[in-house]
Image (cartoon, helix red, strand yellow):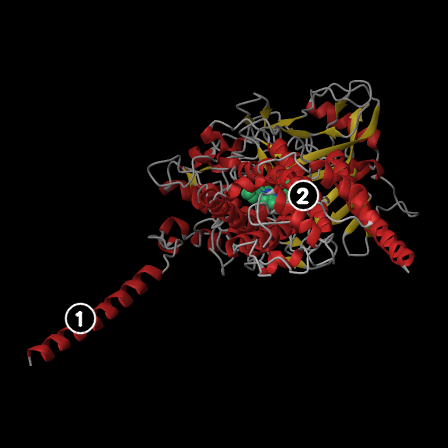
Amino acid sequence: MDLFCKAQLSLWLIILACLSTDAYAVIASEKLDQNITTADHSEFKVLQQQFHSGPEVTKACLQCHTEAAKQVQQSLHWTWEYVQPKTLQTLGKRHVINSFCGSVTSNEPRCTSCHAGYGWEDMKQPPPTDETSVDCLVCHDTTGGYIKLPNAAGHPAYQPMESPLDSGHMKAPPDLTVIAQNVGHSQPANCGSCHFYGGGGDGVKHGDLDSSLVNPPKSLDVHLSAEGANFACSDCHTTTGHITAGSRYQGNAHDTQGIDVPGHTDMSRASCESCHGAAPHHEEKLNEHVDRVACQSCHIPAFARGGVATKTWWDWSTAGKLDENNKPMTVYDENGHLSYLSTKGDFHYAENVTPEYRWFNGTVHYTLQTDTIDSDHPPVQVNWIEGSAHDPDARIWPFKIMHGKQPFDTVNKTLLINHVYSPTDDSALWTNFDWAKALAAGTKIAGQPYSGQFDFIETEMYWPISHMVGPADSAVKCSSCHARNSRLNGIPDIYIPARDHNSLLDKIGWGTALLMLIGSAAHAGGRGISALRRRRNKK
Amino acid sequence: MSRVMVFKRFERFWHWSQAALIFFLLFTGFEVHGTYQVLGFGKAVQLHSTAAWALITLWVFAIFWHFTTGEWRQYIPVTDKLGAVIYYYAVGTFTGAAHPFKKTTLAKHNPLQRLAYLWLKLIISPLIWVSGLLYLFYNQLDQIGLGNIPLEWIALTHTAAAFLMMIFIIAHVYMATMGKTPLSLIKPMITGYEPEQEDATAASASNEQSGEKPL
Ligand code: HEM
């Protein structure tokens, strides 16, 4: 009886244990919804009004979020200005030249359509100081209805507009009241409305950032995919007080701090190591790679993988040709990608692009409009990256290297300000199709010294690849780098097994082995023949 | 005439498993070297490392065995008959002369073999072993103060040693077929026993030399 009781008791205990671990499992696996908020903005009186402009909405936001505009106005998203801490160059979109559209300067109302504000129309002036000129909605709209016009210095449409152009179809302007009542945390679509369309179109600039990341399959991006980690951009680009972590002007190419434990480290998660640590593989040999190879190099096997092509070549020198009716031309290649525009010149697009690899320590230098270029040795590096095998902070990183041709001053040896867009006159290339006129006007607006003599020079520009991380099993295979024909063929000063060998040693080694074989065969032959002879002689 | 065991069970096990491992290490090693792609680099490295550990383990046992049994004395170089053996391979084998040496349990290797195996055991193998271990633990070398050795030196030493091993093996395999029949020298390494029909003159010559009574 006693025994029976004991048995019964332990049975109950077992059942209880099962139930409790089960309950624990449910609690542990329940995922927090990070987008839950404590405020329903449609309940707020101040948002229950008809808004006629972006700044009007911002004014309403600031009634509660008193510090938000001040914070945004401190951020790189606002200032477009960044003093590189190592090179002390003044960078940022306000100052640099790139190998896509050239420069923001002289093309303001168009380029500032991606400014996180309203009405910045002159790059020589700092951005507007008025707090209501901050654009809250571009980052916090959750409806998808808020769209900044491409050429209105950051404003959305306030009137019905014909869209697409010349279609006769009128599109209503965004309903700012609905949008203001439905604000929330920034989603990839918010960040992407600018960052996916850099360089003048979807996927054009970065190659690892395009609209395919709004709702990507896990195979494309394990972090952003709903089947994967279901992140927002800000889960890695941690943002506090509207200041966002992760910079391309000064990157952290080798995060040795490891896992970012709240309260213990810098709270920046804009590196793989901040979540995955410095030894993330089961196999020790793979962990032994991380001191010299960036995670991205293996885990982003190709960029532009989501079905959106990226621009790899942009030759401005051919822009300006018109057809027989004096009309600008648009030409597509066999894949349906743009290959020529009278406004922009010749292009190449590519999908599933294998990155190029370089030593990189995070520091990026720029050729600014004041810097002299070496025009005898193109390509000119519009930006260039620091790093070598001897630099312990450098690792092998993947890059998109953008190539093309850009205008330069043949006397002053400088890259020239490219004036393509003007809403008011015919000074710009996209209206006059005349380079001489456009460059004269652009340099004048920018205050750039210009001899009046120009030509085009080949340029290249480095874009580090860090997004579109695929599932572990899609990582680059060992033999993609460890082979004579290696992805890392351009990487100097490091011995990579299977890629590298000493050909003299190989020649001596194989040669001696061959001689030994031939010698043995000859010796064996000799023995055979002499044995035969001896046998014959005996007879 | 009773049969004599010249190669004991451990010795044969050791010989053939070492042979298999070395062939396998050559095969995977030259894939790691980039000479061909068969298994895939990652797999080749993994198998090469596993086989290397097996070989090291085997060597540890073999070294222990050599010292506890005193068999290491088999590799002490001797000059007696060295010339005769070299003359045999260079000339005698063509004229039908008898091999000047006969194996016994006390002298299993002819003087030339002794030198060749000593070279294998004291030069080639340690070279491969040491360079291989440095290669394997390259990322930890700074902990033992060797962090300044470039990987390239280690890799080239290891590759050079692998070539030496390959060349040794070619010669070794060929010479193993130079008995009375192509397999007559190889059989004892499998069965352990010397074939009874081996040349009698050579046998007595060798036995005299080693001070043994003819069996
Ligand atoms: C003690 C035993 C051995 C150890 C510990 C060892 C270890 C290694 C290691 C770690 C590598 C480099 C793999 C990598 O890239 O990560 C390697 C490469 C190689 N091994 Fe071995 N190995 C051993 C024995 C052998 C033997 C017996 C041979 C051939 C007879 C051999 C031939 C090679 C070759 C040809 C390479 C390629 C070298 C290069 O091109 O860099 N190894 N070995």
Q: Is mark 2 within 8 Å of ligand 1?
A: yes
The residue indicated by pointer 1 is A13
- Residue B189 image offset from top left, x and y in percent: 61, 56
Where residue A305 appears, as percent x and y from the top left, is 65, 54
Near mark 2 (Cα within 10 A), the count class, few <14, some 14-19 or many ≥20, is: many
Task: Find out whether the residues at labels 1 and 2 contact each other: C-beta distance under 8 Å.
Answer: no
| The furthest residue to the right | A324
Amino acid bearing label 2: Ala
Q: Residue at the far left: name it.
A: A2
Relative to B59, B179 lies left or right: right
Residue under circle 2? A498
Q: Pick whichever, B20 or A38, lies toward us.
A: B20
Quick one: label 1 or label 2, which is nearer the N terminus? Answer: 1
Residue in view at x 54 percent, y 28 percent: A392
Of residues A417 and A283, the one nearer the viewer is A283
Q: Quadrant of residue A264?
A: top left
Q: Nearer the viewer, residue A317 or B25?
A: B25
Ligand 1 falls in quadrant? top right
